[in-house]
Image (cartoon, grey):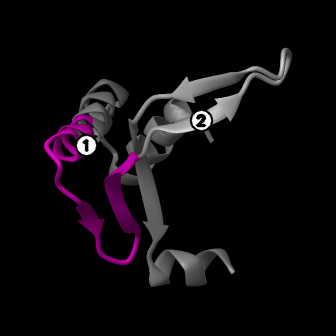
Amino acid sequence: MNKMDLIAAVADETALPRTKTTEVVDAVFAAIAGALKGGEEVRLVGFGTFAATKRKASTGRNPRTGEEMQIPESTTVRFKVGKQLKDAVN
């Protein structure tokens, strides 16, 4: 399922026009991204938790040349699945 499939499914379920549903889905994604950027955790009970975490800088190897290279510190998003979603998928 891609974003357009998600929008179509939500539009069908809610009987909203697709243009309005697109705005709603985009707003939800923007709210999640904004909260993560602000250092907050996004907890959707029953679905899961999104959290931004920092990765430490490390030394890696270029797979082509084998030479060492520095990998800078970065921020990544982690998702921990909620119990209801986990049970629904199993």
Q: Is residue 43 magenta?
A: yes
Residue at 66% x, 33% y is 60
Describe the element under mark 2 as helix, strand or loop.
Answer: strand
Q: Residue flagged by tag 2: what amino acid is it?
A: Thr
Q: CA distance from mark 2 to mark 1?
A: 37 Å
Q: Nearer the viewer, residue 90 or 4?
A: 90
Question: Toward which corner of the image does residue 23 lie, by quadrant?
Answer: top left
Q: Label 1, on which residue?
A: 28
Dots 2, 1 in contact, CB < 8 A: no
Q: Label 2, on which residue?
A: 59
- Is 52 left or right of 4, judged from the image as shown? left
Q: Which residues are magenta?
A: 30-55
Image vertical order of residue 76 relative to residue 88, above or below: above
* Furthest-front residue in this view: 68
Give the x, y percent position of residue 28: 25, 43
Residue at 24% x, 34% y is 30
* Furthest-left residue in this view: 38
Q: Nearer the viewer, residue 75 or 31?
A: 75
Q: Which mark is residue 82?
A: none
Mark 2 vs mark 1: in front? 2
Residue at 86% x, 16% y is 64
Quadrant holding the N terminus: top right
Question: Toward which corner of the image does residue 59 lie, by quadrant?
Answer: top right
Residue at 69% x, 81% y is 90
Give the x, y percent position of residue 69: 62, 23
Q: Earlier in the sequence, mark 2 or mark 1?
A: 1
Describe the element under mark 1 as helix, strand or loop.
Answer: helix
Q: Residues within 10 Å of mark 1 (few under 14, many from 20)?
A: few
Give the x, y percent position of residue 35: 17, 46
Q: Is residue 1 magenta?
A: no
